[in-house]
Image: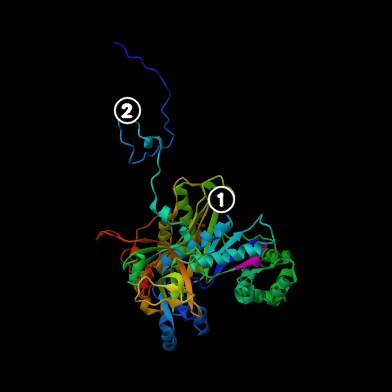
Protein backbone atom coordinates (compact mmCIF):
# COMPACT_ATOMS: atom_id res chain seq x y z
CA UNK A 1 0.00 0.00 0.00
CA UNK A 2 1.04 3.56 -0.74
CA UNK A 3 -0.10 6.68 1.06
CA UNK A 4 0.06 10.24 -0.17
CA UNK A 5 0.21 12.56 2.81
CA UNK A 6 -0.43 16.19 2.00
CA UNK A 7 -0.44 19.24 4.26
CA UNK A 8 -3.54 21.37 3.79
CA UNK A 9 -2.73 24.94 2.64
CA UNK A 10 0.75 24.34 4.03
CA UNK A 11 2.34 27.82 4.13
CA UNK A 12 -0.83 29.37 5.51
CA UNK A 13 -1.13 26.58 8.09
CA UNK A 14 2.46 27.28 9.23
CA UNK A 15 1.58 30.93 9.81
CA UNK A 16 -1.58 29.96 11.72
CA UNK A 17 0.30 27.71 14.17
CA UNK A 18 1.83 30.75 15.85
CA UNK A 19 -1.06 33.13 15.23
CA UNK A 20 -4.28 31.55 16.53
CA UNK A 21 -6.07 34.81 15.78
CA UNK A 22 -5.82 33.96 12.05
CA UNK A 23 -8.23 31.01 12.40
CA UNK A 24 -11.16 31.46 10.04
CA UNK A 25 -9.72 34.55 8.37
CA UNK A 26 -8.64 34.96 4.73
CA UNK A 27 -4.85 34.52 4.79
CA UNK A 28 -2.40 34.49 1.89
CA UNK A 29 1.34 34.09 1.38
CA UNK A 30 3.22 36.03 -1.30
CA UNK A 31 6.32 35.14 -3.33
CA UNK A 32 9.65 36.16 -1.86
CA UNK A 33 9.59 39.57 -3.45
CA UNK A 34 5.96 40.13 -2.46
CA UNK A 35 4.94 39.73 -6.10
CA UNK A 36 2.25 37.08 -6.38
CA UNK A 37 -0.02 35.02 -4.16
CA UNK A 38 1.42 31.49 -3.79
CA UNK A 39 -0.65 30.10 -0.91
CA UNK A 40 -4.23 30.74 0.16
CA UNK A 41 -6.41 29.80 3.09
CA UNK A 42 -9.84 28.39 2.12
CA UNK A 43 -11.32 31.75 3.16
CA UNK A 44 -9.07 33.61 0.72
CA UNK A 45 -9.97 31.16 -2.06
CA UNK A 46 -13.63 31.85 -1.30
CA UNK A 47 -13.00 35.55 -1.92
CA UNK A 48 -12.03 34.63 -5.48
CA UNK A 49 -8.30 35.34 -5.17
CA UNK A 50 -6.52 33.13 -7.72
CA UNK A 51 -3.25 31.28 -7.26
CA UNK A 52 -0.45 33.40 -8.75
CA UNK A 53 -2.48 36.60 -8.66
CA UNK A 54 -0.16 39.65 -8.56
CA UNK A 55 -0.44 41.20 -5.10
CA UNK A 56 -0.51 44.80 -6.30
CA UNK A 57 -3.51 44.04 -8.52
CA UNK A 58 -5.71 42.71 -5.70
CA UNK A 59 -8.97 44.56 -5.20
CA UNK A 60 -8.38 47.04 -2.33
CA UNK A 61 -11.66 45.89 -0.82
CA UNK A 62 -10.34 42.33 -0.60
CA UNK A 63 -6.90 43.47 0.50
CA UNK A 64 -8.42 45.19 3.53
CA UNK A 65 -10.14 42.02 4.70
CA UNK A 66 -7.25 39.62 4.39
CA UNK A 67 -3.89 39.08 6.02
CA UNK A 68 -1.00 38.74 3.57
CA UNK A 69 2.44 37.46 4.49
CA UNK A 70 5.75 37.55 2.69
CA UNK A 71 7.03 34.01 2.34
CA UNK A 72 8.96 32.82 5.38
CA UNK A 73 10.94 29.89 4.01
CA UNK A 74 12.94 29.41 7.20
CA UNK A 75 9.68 28.67 9.03
CA UNK A 76 8.11 26.54 6.28
CA UNK A 77 11.28 24.47 5.88
CA UNK A 78 11.49 23.80 9.62
CA UNK A 79 7.81 22.88 9.92
CA UNK A 80 8.08 20.61 6.90
CA UNK A 81 10.99 18.80 8.59
CA UNK A 82 8.91 18.35 11.74
CA UNK A 83 6.01 16.89 9.77
CA UNK A 84 8.32 14.50 7.92
CA UNK A 85 9.87 13.43 11.23
CA UNK A 86 6.45 12.20 12.35
CA UNK A 87 6.00 10.27 9.07
CA UNK A 88 9.27 8.50 9.75
CA UNK A 89 7.87 7.20 13.03
CA UNK A 90 5.20 5.34 11.03
CA UNK A 91 7.24 3.94 8.11
CA UNK A 92 10.90 3.93 7.05
CA UNK A 93 9.90 4.43 3.40
CA UNK A 94 9.24 8.16 2.93
CA UNK A 95 9.69 9.94 -0.39
CA UNK A 96 9.35 13.69 -0.28
CA UNK A 97 7.44 14.66 -3.38
CA UNK A 98 7.05 18.35 -2.71
CA UNK A 99 7.47 20.70 0.21
CA UNK A 100 4.05 19.66 1.52
CA UNK A 101 3.49 16.20 0.00
CA UNK A 102 5.15 12.86 0.72
CA UNK A 103 4.56 9.37 -0.60
CA UNK A 104 4.79 6.81 2.18
CA UNK A 105 5.37 3.14 1.40
CA UNK A 106 3.55 0.67 3.63
CA UNK A 107 4.83 -2.58 2.10
CA UNK A 108 4.58 -5.41 4.57
CA UNK A 109 2.06 -3.66 6.79
CA UNK A 110 -1.14 -5.63 7.30
CA UNK A 111 -3.83 -4.23 4.99
CA UNK A 112 -6.53 -4.00 7.61
CA UNK A 113 -5.68 -1.49 10.27
CA UNK A 114 -3.72 0.67 7.84
CA UNK A 115 -6.44 3.30 7.84
CA UNK A 116 -6.27 3.45 11.64
CA UNK A 117 -2.48 3.61 11.45
CA UNK A 118 -2.73 6.60 9.09
CA UNK A 119 -5.42 8.25 11.19
CA UNK A 120 -3.10 8.02 14.23
CA UNK A 121 -0.31 9.56 12.16
CA UNK A 122 -2.58 12.38 11.02
CA UNK A 123 -3.59 13.18 14.60
CA UNK A 124 0.02 13.07 15.78
CA UNK A 125 1.11 15.50 13.06
CA UNK A 126 -1.75 17.79 14.04
CA UNK A 127 -0.86 17.66 17.73
CA UNK A 128 2.91 18.00 17.40
CA UNK A 129 3.09 20.56 14.61
CA UNK A 130 -0.38 22.11 14.43
CA UNK A 131 -0.46 21.36 10.69
CA UNK A 132 -3.62 19.68 9.30
CA UNK A 133 -2.88 16.92 6.78
CA UNK A 134 -4.90 14.65 4.48
CA UNK A 135 -3.95 11.10 3.59
CA UNK A 136 -4.93 9.05 0.54
CA UNK A 137 -4.29 5.30 0.48
CA UNK A 138 -4.19 2.86 -2.43
CA UNK A 139 -1.88 0.49 -4.27
CA UNK A 140 -0.50 3.01 -6.79
CA UNK A 141 0.66 6.62 -6.53
CA UNK A 142 -1.94 7.85 -9.02
CA UNK A 143 -4.80 6.25 -7.06
CA UNK A 144 -3.31 7.42 -3.74
CA UNK A 145 -3.35 10.94 -5.14
CA UNK A 146 -7.03 10.61 -6.08
CA UNK A 147 -7.79 9.15 -2.64
CA UNK A 148 -6.00 12.11 -1.09
CA UNK A 149 -8.22 14.49 -2.99
CA UNK A 150 -11.23 12.61 -1.64
CA UNK A 151 -9.87 12.76 1.93
CA UNK A 152 -9.56 16.51 1.62
CA UNK A 153 -12.99 17.09 0.09
CA UNK A 154 -15.26 14.71 1.99
CA UNK A 155 -15.65 15.69 5.63
CA UNK A 156 -16.88 12.16 6.42
CA UNK A 157 -13.41 10.77 5.62
CA UNK A 158 -11.90 12.64 8.59
CA UNK A 159 -8.78 13.26 6.58
CA UNK A 160 -8.02 9.66 5.56
CA UNK A 161 -9.44 7.92 2.48
CA UNK A 162 -8.72 4.45 1.12
CA UNK A 163 -9.38 3.48 -2.51
CA UNK A 164 -8.79 -0.25 -3.07
CA UNK A 165 -8.20 -0.68 -6.84
CA UNK A 166 -11.02 -3.18 -7.26
CA UNK A 167 -13.99 -1.72 -5.46
CA UNK A 168 -17.32 -0.06 -6.16
CA UNK A 169 -16.24 3.10 -4.32
CA UNK A 170 -13.17 3.45 -6.51
CA UNK A 171 -15.25 2.89 -9.62
CA UNK A 172 -17.77 5.55 -8.60
CA UNK A 173 -14.99 8.03 -7.80
CA UNK A 174 -13.17 7.43 -11.09
CA UNK A 175 -16.39 7.68 -13.11
CA UNK A 176 -16.99 11.14 -11.71
CA UNK A 177 -13.42 12.35 -12.11
CA UNK A 178 -12.61 14.30 -15.32
CA UNK A 179 -9.60 12.72 -17.01
CA UNK A 180 -7.64 15.99 -16.89
CA UNK A 181 -7.63 15.79 -13.10
CA UNK A 182 -5.71 12.54 -13.15
CA UNK A 183 -2.09 12.97 -12.06
CA UNK A 184 0.13 13.56 -15.08
CA UNK A 185 -2.63 14.15 -17.66
CA UNK A 186 -2.19 17.62 -19.09
CA UNK A 187 -5.04 19.73 -20.35
CA UNK A 188 -3.93 19.46 -23.98
CA UNK A 189 -3.65 15.69 -23.71
CA UNK A 190 -7.16 15.79 -22.26
CA UNK A 191 -8.50 17.29 -25.48
CA UNK A 192 -6.98 14.50 -27.56
CA UNK A 193 -8.33 11.89 -25.16
CA UNK A 194 -11.77 13.49 -25.44
CA UNK A 195 -11.60 13.00 -29.21
CA UNK A 196 -11.19 9.31 -28.54
CA UNK A 197 -14.23 9.33 -26.28
CA UNK A 198 -12.20 9.25 -23.05
CA UNK A 199 -13.60 11.84 -20.68
CA UNK A 200 -13.39 10.30 -17.24
CA UNK A 201 -10.66 8.61 -15.23
CA UNK A 202 -12.64 5.37 -15.36
CA UNK A 203 -12.73 5.43 -19.19
CA UNK A 204 -8.97 5.94 -19.20
CA UNK A 205 -8.52 3.00 -16.85
CA UNK A 206 -10.57 0.79 -19.19
CA UNK A 207 -8.67 1.90 -22.32
CA UNK A 208 -6.07 -0.28 -24.05
CA UNK A 209 -2.68 0.57 -22.53
CA UNK A 210 -0.71 -0.48 -25.61
CA UNK A 211 -2.79 1.65 -27.90
CA UNK A 212 -2.32 4.66 -25.65
CA UNK A 213 1.40 4.04 -25.59
CA UNK A 214 1.42 4.14 -29.39
CA UNK A 215 -0.74 7.27 -29.59
CA UNK A 216 0.72 9.19 -26.65
CA UNK A 217 3.68 7.94 -24.68
CA UNK A 218 4.87 5.34 -22.27
CA UNK A 219 3.87 7.72 -19.48
CA UNK A 220 0.24 7.53 -20.57
CA UNK A 221 0.42 3.75 -20.63
CA UNK A 222 1.79 3.76 -17.09
CA UNK A 223 -1.05 6.03 -15.99
CA UNK A 224 -3.54 3.40 -17.17
CA UNK A 225 -1.74 0.69 -15.18
CA UNK A 226 -1.63 3.01 -12.17
CA UNK A 227 -5.38 3.60 -12.38
CA UNK A 228 -5.79 -0.18 -12.35
CA UNK A 229 -3.78 -0.22 -9.14
CA UNK A 230 -0.31 -1.24 -10.31
CA UNK A 231 2.42 1.06 -9.01
CA UNK A 232 4.75 1.89 -11.91
CA UNK A 233 5.51 5.63 -11.89
CA UNK A 234 8.90 6.69 -10.53
CA UNK A 235 9.09 10.02 -8.75
CA UNK A 236 12.43 11.01 -10.25
CA UNK A 237 11.13 12.92 -13.18
CA UNK A 238 7.51 13.62 -12.46
CA UNK A 239 6.70 17.25 -12.81
CA UNK A 240 3.47 19.07 -12.46
CA UNK A 241 3.83 22.05 -14.73
CA UNK A 242 2.90 25.28 -12.94
CA UNK A 243 3.40 23.66 -9.56
CA UNK A 244 6.85 22.21 -9.25
CA UNK A 245 9.70 20.62 -11.15
CA UNK A 246 11.42 17.63 -9.66
CA UNK A 247 14.70 16.26 -10.93
CA UNK A 248 16.30 13.47 -9.00
CA UNK A 249 17.84 10.10 -9.53
CA UNK A 250 19.12 7.18 -7.55
CA UNK A 251 22.86 6.62 -7.75
CA UNK A 252 23.91 3.38 -9.43
CA UNK A 253 25.55 2.46 -6.14
CA UNK A 254 25.54 4.06 -2.72
CA UNK A 255 27.93 6.99 -2.52
CA UNK A 256 29.24 9.22 0.19
CA UNK A 257 31.61 11.14 -2.06
CA UNK A 258 31.06 14.85 -1.63
CA UNK A 259 32.29 15.67 -5.12
CA UNK A 260 30.00 13.11 -6.69
CA UNK A 261 26.99 14.39 -4.75
CA UNK A 262 27.75 17.96 -5.75
CA UNK A 263 28.04 16.98 -9.38
CA UNK A 264 24.68 15.22 -9.24
CA UNK A 265 22.99 18.17 -7.53
CA UNK A 266 24.44 20.63 -10.06
CA UNK A 267 23.17 18.41 -12.84
CA UNK A 268 19.67 18.13 -11.38
CA UNK A 269 19.51 21.88 -10.71
CA UNK A 270 20.57 22.72 -14.28
CA UNK A 271 18.05 20.35 -15.79
CA UNK A 272 15.33 21.74 -13.57
CA UNK A 273 16.17 25.29 -14.65
CA UNK A 274 16.03 24.22 -18.28
CA UNK A 275 12.54 22.76 -17.82
CA UNK A 276 11.53 25.90 -15.99
CA UNK A 277 12.51 28.07 -18.96
CA UNK A 278 10.77 25.72 -21.36
CA UNK A 279 7.46 26.17 -19.59
CA UNK A 280 7.93 29.93 -19.10
CA UNK A 281 7.90 29.87 -15.32
CA UNK A 282 10.04 31.31 -12.57
CA UNK A 283 10.78 29.49 -9.31
CA UNK A 284 10.68 31.24 -5.94
CA UNK A 285 12.26 28.47 -3.89
CA UNK A 286 13.87 25.10 -4.16
CA UNK A 287 14.21 21.96 -2.11
CA UNK A 288 17.44 19.96 -2.02
CA UNK A 289 17.25 16.48 -0.60
CA UNK A 290 19.47 13.50 0.11
CA UNK A 291 18.43 10.11 1.33
CA UNK A 292 19.98 6.77 2.19
CA UNK A 293 18.52 3.40 1.29
CA UNK A 294 15.75 2.65 3.84
CA UNK A 295 15.98 -1.04 2.93
CA UNK A 296 19.55 -1.25 4.23
CA UNK A 297 18.79 -0.60 7.91
CA UNK A 298 22.21 -1.95 8.88
CA UNK A 299 23.84 1.13 7.33
CA UNK A 300 23.71 4.61 8.88
CA UNK A 301 20.43 6.21 7.84
CA UNK A 302 20.07 9.85 6.95
CA UNK A 303 17.33 11.61 5.08
CA UNK A 304 17.10 15.32 4.96
CA UNK A 305 15.61 17.97 2.79
CA UNK A 306 16.18 21.68 2.94
CA UNK A 307 13.92 24.40 1.62
CA UNK A 308 15.76 27.45 0.35
CA UNK A 309 14.40 30.74 -0.89
CA UNK A 310 15.89 31.87 -4.19
CA UNK A 311 17.11 35.47 -4.12
CA UNK A 312 14.25 36.38 -6.44
CA UNK A 313 11.74 34.54 -8.62
CA UNK A 314 14.09 33.28 -11.29
CA UNK A 315 14.80 30.86 -14.13
CA UNK A 316 18.52 31.64 -14.12
CA UNK A 317 20.55 28.43 -13.98
CA UNK A 318 23.37 30.20 -12.19
CA UNK A 319 21.24 31.28 -9.24
CA UNK A 320 19.50 27.92 -9.07
CA UNK A 321 22.69 25.84 -9.21
CA UNK A 322 24.34 28.08 -6.63
CA UNK A 323 21.45 27.80 -4.19
CA UNK A 324 21.20 24.04 -4.66
CA UNK A 325 24.94 23.55 -4.01
CA UNK A 326 24.79 25.68 -0.88
CA UNK A 327 21.82 23.64 0.29
CA UNK A 328 23.68 20.37 -0.27
CA UNK A 329 26.61 21.61 1.82
CA UNK A 330 24.27 22.20 4.71
CA UNK A 331 22.56 18.81 4.71
CA UNK A 332 25.30 16.47 3.51
CA UNK A 333 26.74 14.36 6.32
CA UNK A 334 30.25 13.02 5.93
CA UNK A 335 30.67 9.27 6.11
CA UNK A 336 27.10 8.44 5.10
CA UNK A 337 26.47 6.52 1.88
CA UNK A 338 23.55 8.03 0.00
CA UNK A 339 21.23 6.30 -2.41
CA UNK A 340 19.53 9.28 -3.91
CA UNK A 341 19.59 13.04 -4.17
CA UNK A 342 17.55 15.58 -6.01
CA UNK A 343 16.40 19.13 -6.52
CA UNK A 344 12.86 20.36 -6.64
CA UNK A 345 11.98 23.77 -7.95
CA UNK A 346 8.87 25.00 -6.25
CA UNK A 347 6.47 27.91 -5.88
CA UNK A 348 6.45 28.49 -9.60
CA UNK A 349 4.95 31.67 -10.98
CA UNK A 350 4.16 32.75 -14.47
CA UNK A 351 7.00 34.55 -16.12
CA UNK A 352 4.71 37.11 -17.71
CA UNK A 353 2.96 37.86 -14.43
CA UNK A 354 6.21 38.44 -12.68
CA UNK A 355 7.43 40.83 -15.34
CA UNK A 356 4.24 42.84 -15.18
CA UNK A 357 4.98 43.48 -11.56
CA UNK A 358 7.01 46.65 -11.87
CA UNK A 359 7.51 46.90 -8.14
CA UNK A 360 9.34 43.60 -8.12
CA UNK A 361 11.79 44.79 -10.68
CA UNK A 362 14.93 45.24 -8.64
CA UNK A 363 17.06 43.57 -11.23
CA UNK A 364 18.10 46.09 -13.83
CA UNK A 365 16.75 45.64 -17.34
CA UNK A 366 20.24 45.39 -18.74
CA UNK A 367 21.15 42.64 -16.31
CA UNK A 368 17.95 40.76 -16.98
CA UNK A 369 18.43 40.94 -20.73
CA UNK A 370 21.98 39.72 -20.39
CA UNK A 371 20.88 36.81 -18.23
CA UNK A 372 18.10 35.91 -20.67
CA UNK A 373 20.50 35.87 -23.61
CA UNK A 374 22.98 33.76 -21.68
CA UNK A 375 20.32 31.24 -20.64
CA UNK A 376 18.92 31.03 -24.19
CA UNK A 377 22.41 30.34 -25.54
CA UNK A 378 22.97 27.74 -22.83
CA UNK A 379 19.75 25.94 -23.74
CA UNK A 380 20.50 26.12 -27.45
CA UNK A 381 23.99 24.65 -27.05
CA UNK A 382 22.70 21.84 -24.89
CA UNK A 383 19.88 21.15 -27.30
CA UNK A 384 21.98 21.12 -30.44
CA UNK A 385 25.23 19.65 -29.23
CA UNK A 386 23.76 17.24 -26.71
CA UNK A 387 22.60 17.57 -23.12
CA UNK A 388 25.31 18.66 -20.72
CA UNK A 389 27.58 20.24 -23.36
CA UNK A 390 27.75 23.42 -21.35
CA UNK A 391 27.57 23.01 -17.60
CA UNK A 392 27.80 25.44 -14.76
CA UNK A 393 30.52 25.28 -12.19
CA UNK A 394 30.15 26.74 -8.74
CA UNK A 395 29.45 30.44 -8.68
CA UNK A 396 29.76 33.35 -6.34
CA UNK A 397 26.97 34.75 -4.32
CA UNK A 398 25.34 37.92 -5.49
CA UNK A 399 25.37 39.93 -2.30
CA UNK A 400 24.03 43.02 -3.99
CA UNK A 401 20.56 41.60 -4.04
CA UNK A 402 18.30 42.44 -1.16
CA UNK A 403 15.16 40.50 -0.65
CA UNK A 404 11.98 42.45 -0.44
CA UNK A 405 9.74 40.87 2.15
CA UNK A 406 7.84 43.60 3.89
CA UNK A 407 5.29 41.33 5.58
CA UNK A 408 7.40 38.38 6.67
CA UNK A 409 6.32 36.78 9.92
CA UNK A 410 9.01 36.07 12.56
CA UNK A 411 11.19 33.01 11.96
CA UNK A 412 9.55 31.51 15.05
CA UNK A 413 11.49 28.26 15.18
CA UNK A 414 14.93 29.07 13.82
CA UNK A 415 16.02 32.38 15.42
CA UNK A 416 16.51 33.14 19.12
CA UNK A 417 15.54 36.74 18.63
CA UNK A 418 12.32 35.87 16.80
CA UNK A 419 10.78 33.26 19.11
CA UNK A 420 7.01 33.36 19.55
CA UNK A 421 6.10 35.71 22.38
CA UNK A 422 3.59 34.38 24.89
CA UNK A 423 1.85 37.01 26.96
CA UNK A 424 1.63 36.32 30.69
CA UNK A 425 -1.67 37.98 31.35
CA UNK B 1 74.69 -0.88 29.02
CA UNK B 2 71.93 -2.42 26.96
CA UNK B 3 68.23 -1.84 26.80
CA UNK B 4 65.95 -4.73 26.13
CA UNK B 5 63.12 -3.95 23.74
CA UNK B 6 60.08 -6.15 23.41
CA UNK B 7 57.79 -5.77 20.47
CA UNK B 8 54.30 -5.78 21.92
CA UNK B 9 52.36 -5.10 18.74
CA UNK B 10 51.71 -2.60 16.03
CA UNK B 11 50.11 0.77 16.51
CA UNK B 12 46.51 0.67 15.33
CA UNK B 13 46.24 3.63 13.01
CA UNK B 14 42.70 2.94 11.95
CA UNK B 15 40.75 2.95 15.17
CA UNK B 16 38.85 6.10 16.03
CA UNK B 17 40.31 8.13 18.89
CA UNK B 18 38.57 7.71 22.21
CA UNK B 19 37.31 10.93 23.71
CA UNK B 20 38.33 11.31 27.32
CA UNK B 21 36.15 13.09 29.83
CA UNK B 22 37.20 16.63 30.62
CA UNK B 23 37.18 16.18 34.37
CA UNK B 24 38.84 12.91 35.32
CA UNK B 25 39.33 11.99 38.95
CA UNK B 26 42.10 13.75 40.80
CA UNK B 27 45.30 11.76 41.00
CA UNK B 28 45.89 10.81 44.59
CA UNK B 29 48.67 8.48 45.62
CA UNK B 30 47.44 5.31 47.16
CA UNK B 31 43.71 5.84 46.77
CA UNK B 32 42.35 5.38 43.26
CA UNK B 33 39.26 7.52 42.85
CA UNK B 34 36.14 5.52 42.07
CA UNK B 35 35.43 8.03 39.29
CA UNK B 36 38.43 6.72 37.34
CA UNK B 37 36.56 3.50 36.72
CA UNK B 38 34.07 5.15 34.42
CA UNK B 39 34.54 6.78 31.07
CA UNK B 40 31.82 9.42 30.97
CA UNK B 41 30.06 10.84 27.95
CA UNK B 42 29.70 14.60 27.56
CA UNK B 43 26.46 15.81 29.04
CA UNK B 44 24.06 17.02 26.40
CA UNK B 45 21.74 19.53 28.05
CA UNK B 46 19.37 19.79 25.08
CA UNK B 47 19.02 16.01 24.85
CA UNK B 48 18.34 15.95 28.59
CA UNK B 49 15.64 18.61 28.49
CA UNK B 50 14.03 17.83 25.16
CA UNK B 51 12.19 14.53 25.02
CA UNK B 52 10.50 14.98 21.62
CA UNK B 53 12.74 17.15 19.40
CA UNK B 54 10.41 17.44 16.41
CA UNK B 55 7.50 18.42 18.69
CA UNK B 56 9.44 20.88 20.85
CA UNK B 57 9.26 24.65 20.48
CA UNK B 58 10.89 27.50 22.37
CA UNK B 59 8.80 30.50 23.30
CA UNK B 60 9.52 33.77 25.09
CA UNK B 61 7.51 34.78 28.17
CA UNK B 62 6.29 38.33 28.39
CA UNK B 63 4.44 39.78 31.36
CA UNK B 64 3.94 39.06 35.06
CA UNK B 65 0.92 36.75 35.38
CA UNK B 66 2.97 33.60 36.12
CA UNK B 67 5.55 34.84 38.62
CA UNK B 68 4.14 32.61 41.40
CA UNK B 69 5.19 29.62 39.27
CA UNK B 70 8.64 31.11 38.77
CA UNK B 71 8.09 32.37 35.23
CA UNK B 72 9.30 35.93 34.76
CA UNK B 73 9.27 38.45 31.96
CA UNK B 74 11.81 37.49 29.31
CA UNK B 75 12.18 33.84 30.35
CA UNK B 76 12.69 31.15 27.74
CA UNK B 77 10.11 28.35 27.95
CA UNK B 78 10.55 24.87 26.49
CA UNK B 79 7.24 23.63 25.15
CA UNK B 80 6.50 20.02 24.21
CA UNK B 81 3.48 19.57 21.96
CA UNK B 82 3.67 15.78 22.05
CA UNK B 83 2.52 15.66 25.68
CA UNK B 84 -1.14 15.53 26.72
CA UNK B 85 -2.13 18.13 29.29
CA UNK B 86 -2.57 16.82 32.84
CA UNK B 87 -3.94 18.70 35.88
CA UNK B 88 -1.14 20.73 37.41
CA UNK B 89 0.71 21.20 34.10
CA UNK B 90 1.81 24.63 32.98
CA UNK B 91 0.38 25.08 29.49
CA UNK B 92 0.60 27.35 26.51
CA UNK B 93 -3.01 27.91 25.47
CA UNK B 94 -4.74 29.92 22.80
CA UNK B 95 -7.37 32.10 24.47
CA UNK B 96 -9.35 34.50 22.28
CA UNK B 97 -6.86 34.08 19.44
CA UNK B 98 -3.83 34.86 21.59
CA UNK B 99 -1.14 32.58 23.00
CA UNK B 100 -0.89 32.78 26.76
CA UNK B 101 0.49 30.69 29.62
CA UNK B 102 -1.61 29.17 32.45
CA UNK B 103 -1.70 26.27 34.86
CA UNK B 104 -4.36 23.61 34.34
CA UNK B 105 -6.18 23.50 37.69
CA UNK B 106 -9.52 23.84 39.43
CA UNK B 107 -11.54 26.87 40.46
CA UNK B 108 -15.10 26.94 41.85
CA UNK B 109 -15.33 23.16 41.44
CA UNK B 110 -14.63 23.36 37.73
CA UNK B 111 -11.58 22.80 35.48
CA UNK B 112 -9.91 26.14 34.99
CA UNK B 113 -6.82 27.94 33.76
CA UNK B 114 -5.00 29.40 36.74
CA UNK B 115 -2.59 32.33 36.74
CA UNK B 116 0.43 32.58 38.97
CA UNK B 117 -0.56 36.03 40.17
CA UNK B 118 -3.58 36.95 42.29
CA UNK B 119 -4.27 39.97 40.12
CA UNK B 120 -5.45 37.66 37.31
CA UNK B 121 -8.73 35.76 37.74
CA UNK B 122 -8.96 32.07 36.77
CA UNK B 123 -10.57 31.26 33.42
CA UNK B 124 -13.25 28.56 33.83
CA UNK B 125 -13.06 26.02 31.04
CA UNK B 126 -16.78 25.24 30.73
CA UNK B 127 -18.20 26.89 27.63
CA UNK B 128 -14.98 28.68 26.86
CA UNK B 129 -13.05 28.63 23.58
CA UNK B 130 -9.63 27.43 24.65
CA UNK B 131 -7.13 25.33 22.68
CA UNK B 132 -4.12 23.71 24.31
CA UNK B 133 -1.05 24.63 22.27
CA UNK B 134 1.57 22.73 24.24
CA UNK B 135 2.86 21.70 27.65
CA UNK B 136 5.68 23.76 29.19
CA UNK B 137 8.32 21.32 30.43
CA UNK B 138 11.07 23.72 31.53
CA UNK B 139 11.74 27.37 32.13
CA UNK B 140 15.18 28.79 31.32
CA UNK B 141 15.57 31.79 33.59
CA UNK B 142 18.83 33.72 33.28
CA UNK B 143 20.26 34.89 36.63
CA UNK B 144 23.18 36.92 35.38
CA UNK B 145 22.75 39.99 33.32
CA UNK B 146 24.20 39.89 29.83
CA UNK B 147 24.23 36.11 29.39
CA UNK B 148 22.16 34.43 26.72
CA UNK B 149 18.60 33.86 27.78
- Chain ID, mark 1: A
Task: Residue B99 in the image: state x and y as whole percent.
Answer: 41, 73
Q: Give the Cα distance between marks 2 and 1.
A: 54 Å
**Left or right: A78 in relation to A2:** left
The residue that disc 1 covers is: A293
Q: Secondary structure at mark 1?
A: loop
- Chain ID, mark 2: B
Q: Nearer the viewer, residue A292 or A383?
A: A292
Q: Secondary structure at mark 2?
A: loop
Q: Residue furthest top?
A: B1
**Residue A353 visible (yes or no):** no
Per the rendered image, the range of residues in magenta is: A135-144
Which of the 4 image quadrants contains residue A285?
bottom left
Q: Residue at 34% x, 76% y: name it.
A: B119
Q: Nearer the viewer, residue A337 or A277?
A: A337
The residue that disc 2 covers is: B30
Image depth: mark 2 or mark 1 in front: 2
Amino acid sequence: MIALADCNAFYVSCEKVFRPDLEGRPVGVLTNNDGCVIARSPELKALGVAMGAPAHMLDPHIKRQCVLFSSNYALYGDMSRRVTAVYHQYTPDVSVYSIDESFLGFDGFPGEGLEDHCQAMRLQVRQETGIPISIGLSTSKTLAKIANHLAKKEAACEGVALLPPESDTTRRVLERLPVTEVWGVARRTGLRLADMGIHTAWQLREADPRQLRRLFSVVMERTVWELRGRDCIELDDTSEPKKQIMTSRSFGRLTGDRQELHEAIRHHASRGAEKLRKQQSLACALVVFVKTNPFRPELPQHHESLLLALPRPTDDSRLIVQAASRGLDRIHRAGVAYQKCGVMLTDLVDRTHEQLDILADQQSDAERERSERLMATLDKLNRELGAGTVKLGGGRENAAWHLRCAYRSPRYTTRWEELPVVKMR
Amino acid sequence: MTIAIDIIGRVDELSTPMLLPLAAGEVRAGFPSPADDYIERDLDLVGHLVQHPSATYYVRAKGDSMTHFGIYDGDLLIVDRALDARPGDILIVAVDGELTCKQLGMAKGCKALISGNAAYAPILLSGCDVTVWGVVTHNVHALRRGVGR
